[in-house]
Amino acid sequence: MARVLITSALPYINGIKHLGNLVGSQLPADLYARYMRNRGHEVMFICATDEHGTPAELAAAKTGEPVADYCARMHAEQSELAKGFRLSFDHYGRSSSERNHRLTQHFAGRLAQNGFIEEVTEKQVFSHADNRFLPDRYIEGTCPNCGYERARGDQCENCTKQLDPTDLINPRSAISGSTDLEVRETKHLYLRQSALKDEIDAWIDSQTDWPILTTSIAKKWLHDGDGLKDRGITRDLFWGVPVRKGDQDWPGMEGKVFYVWFDAPIEYIAATAEWADANGLSDEAWQRWWRKDKGAEDVRYVQFMGKDNVPFHTLSFPATIMGSREPWKLVDYIKSFNYLNYDGGQFSTSQGRGVFMDDALSLLPADYWRWWLLSHAPENSDSEFNWENFQTSVNKDLADVLGNFVSRITKFCRSKFGEALPEGGETGERAAALIEELETRTRAYEAHMEAMEIRKAATELRAIWVAGNEYLQSAAPWTVHKTDPERAAAMVRLGLNLVRLYAILSEPFIPDASAKMLDAMKVEDRSWPGPIAEALTALKPGHAFETPEVLFAKIADEDREDWAKRFAGVRA
């Protein structure tokens, strides 16, 4: 049994997340966590809301709430939606927690002690209309690299180029829209990433199995232009982790907070501590996942994120960990994703474009969305959601293939033999060929899941479902029953055992449907299958079952057309 630590990039607190956010981090992380648990491994699956910085302040100002109240409300909403999509976090924390405050201050103190923090007097943009300094994300303008007109002062979300506010063309305040801006001096702390460049470079070189997307982004930031730059880790904001040097005051830094991108990844560790607190456990319970001197040496740590988050997880967060010179666990594998686009455009939280998590669950159960999103995950390139493709995938894969198989075999057995597995008969050569195919495909499915090749795993799983349908169609127990009821009984027994097998294999993708199938088959042993020949005799003659309701309803053309119109505009 292995120990697997899984973290998903923290979703911003500034509103309900869209399906692109979901498939870019949390959902594939959940797929992997469920699979690893089902294989008998010890899993710690952690996520949290990212509650500090500009997005929180701007969103709270828009609703008229105090920022702390806004964050508490949105954490509750995001937590409920995560449950609605069956995201199986061991803990869903908050970056505003006391644990994260203390840990962030601890890391800053260690970095300063080790010479990796520098105090820098720099020029920042001050807005006369807002009477405040405008940190990076408070400033919008035209990207000098790609021309995108709503680039932020830290990064262009269109081309992902790292920016400084002064790089922007025609800059304006994101709060008031004012262009009455002035550059003034202010003092901040910088993480001396450049001093750790060679160490980070060597570490990335040692990660030979990382996805090309992850490594290429990291290497670009390390070596392009002037190479890895030192990065400011404090901001002139009201909401965030107060700047302290461990448990001591930091002279000259009064009234400042740590930059959200400094404290947010530290929340992975803090959220695990929150998990221990919530379960009445000691510090040793979370430290065994994170500190190599406390047992984390044998942990495999996997992160899931969209490509825009890669630089901070391959460079800045590792710089924080390494620079502390303490035995914290570094990530072993980073699974990064491209973007999921929406119907010819982009999903965007800030611009309210696309299908959001709450809208999705109001239309259809979670499994419908989970299946489509995971089977179309943007692993090797950007992918696109459109309603026609969604309808086709749901109707063919879920309703016609899996749902139809379960319905046909259970209803046929009930009508001819009753609601228990019938006795007698032999299955023959056709069944032997099916078992051989399923043995090969199941082991391939496992290999894809281990490697986090999500689309390949989905393709293999669908092929496993198809194989059962094709067997049932060619074996035709409803015809054989007329002349040889015993041989038909053997076919039906095999078919009902396939329902159990499909439920277990499919659980990471479609957990609700899996549970319905297992409950209908009255299955107590839900362990992962070994040899398929044995798995297909797990349910014995006489084992009772129930005929389940329809697993997946088809999406009608009129519903698809209505939804396409409904979500064509901008979310209110």
Image (cartoon, rainbow, N blue to C red):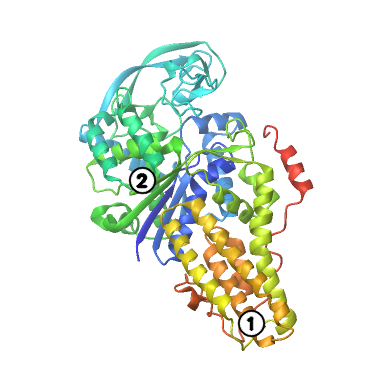
| Left or right position of 509 against 567 | left
Q: Is residue 505 above or below residue 11?
A: below
Q: Which mark is residue 210?
A: 2
The residue lying furthest to the left in this view is 114
How far apart are the alpha carbons under marks 1 and 2? 47 Å
Q: Which mark is residue 227?
A: none
Question: Which residue is depicted at the point 62% across and 63% down?
Answer: 513
Q: Position of residue 498 (x, y in %)?
A: 58, 72
| Left or right position of 149 against 231 | right
Question: Which residue is depicted at the point 66% across and 69% down?
Answer: 406
> Viewer-proximal residue, 369 or 458?
458
Q: Mark 1 falls on what kind of element?
A: loop
> Viewer-proximal residue, 225 or 400?
400
| Left or right position of 184 against 472 | left
The residue lying furthest to the right in this view is 558
Categorize mark 2 by other alpha carbons within 10 Å: few (<14), some (14-19), many (20+): some
Q: Position of residue 94 (x, y in %)?
A: 46, 45
Residue tagged by mark 1? Answer: 544
> Viewer-proximal residue, 400 or 87?
400
Q: Position of residue 457 (x, y in %)?
A: 50, 56
Residue type, label 2: Trp
Residue 110 visible in the snapshot: no
> Viewer-proximal residue, 518 or 410?
410
Q: Mark 2 falls on what kind of element?
A: loop
The residue lying furthest to the bottom in this view is 424
